[in-house]
Image (spheres, grey):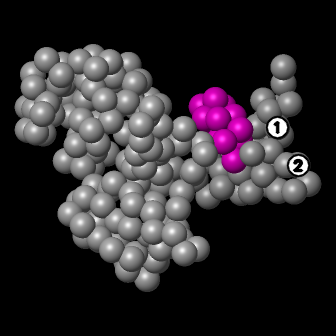
Amino acid sequence: MSGLLEYLEGPVAERGEDFLILALGGVGLRITVPPRTAQAADPALVKLYTHLIVRDDSLELYGFGSREEREMFVGLLAVPQLGPRLAFRLVAALPPEEFIAAIRAGDLSALEQVKGIGRRTAQRVLVELAGRLSKLAPPATTPLSEKEQVVLKALTSKALGFSEAEVRKALESVRGELTQDMAVEDMIRRVLSVLSGP
């Protein structure tokens, strides 16, 4: 149910080792957060990306300092028999970049150092998430050249209205055809033909 509460933002009324209480409109909302988030939170104003877990007898609200941490948590919840507490421990122990590096390398020991994660559970996490890494960590895109940035700005302008994601994808697909001495107008025409194609 993360869609219900995308994020919460407010002053910190109280903090513990792994929780923050946010003061929101006269309500103190207790949110379980990784210890590093609890320590780093600015008491005046903190923004947490949240995920709400509804149980028969309780509501559990988890908060994270970044969208990447929240997505990692949600990805881990899909692993059979892992459960929110172990998923949370993994996020708390390993920042997303370290976690993704461990999955890519098949590094069981990095996962096993987390309390409550044995070899079997670590193997299950590796198997389940290895195939879904592209969702957790999209492949790095090649930086755009100066001319490509001009093409991107032109095609995402209000007049043409393409999204940045669409234009970047089209640029990637024709990158081999675009040369450095090519005029920007020709580059725009070539990319536009891809965007307008079937």
- 139 over 52 or under it: above or below: above
Which residue is label 1 attached to?
192
Secondary structure under the numbered disc 1 in the rendered image? helix
Looking at the image, is 70 positioned above or below residue 174?
below
Highlighted magenta segment, given as a residue range: 164-177
Q: Position of residue 17 (x, y in %)?
A: 20, 63
Q: Residue at x 23, y 40 (%)?
A: 90
Does residue 6 appear in the picture of this structure? Answer: yes
* Mark 2 residue type: Leu
Quadrant where the N terminus is found in the figure: top right
Q: Which residue is mark 2?
A: 160
- Left or right placement of residue 71 versus residue 102 in this view: right
Where does residue 177 sit, x and y in percent of width and height?
A: 65, 32
Q: Is residue 71 visible?
A: no
Which mark identifies residue 123? none
Q: Earlier in the sequence, mark 2 or mark 1?
A: 2
**Measuring 34% from the left and 65% from the top, which residue is drawn there?**
20
Quarter of the picture containing the C terminus is: top right
Disc 2 + disc 1, Cβ < 8 Å: yes
The kind of residue on which mark 1 rests is Leu
Q: In the image, residue 108 lies at what x, y percent?
A: 12, 27
* Farthest residue, direction right: 159
Packing grade of label 1 (10 A; few <14, some 14-19, many >=20) is some
User: Where is 47 relative to 128, above or below?
Assistant: below
Cα distance, mark 2 to mark 1? Answer: 10 Å
The residue under the point 78% across, 52% down is 156
- Image check: 94 left or right of 70? left
Quadrant of the rendered image containing residue 175: top right
Q: Report helix, strand or loop for mark 2.
A: loop
The quadrant where residue 195 appears: top right
Instruction: Confirm whether the magenta stretch covers residue 77.
Output: no
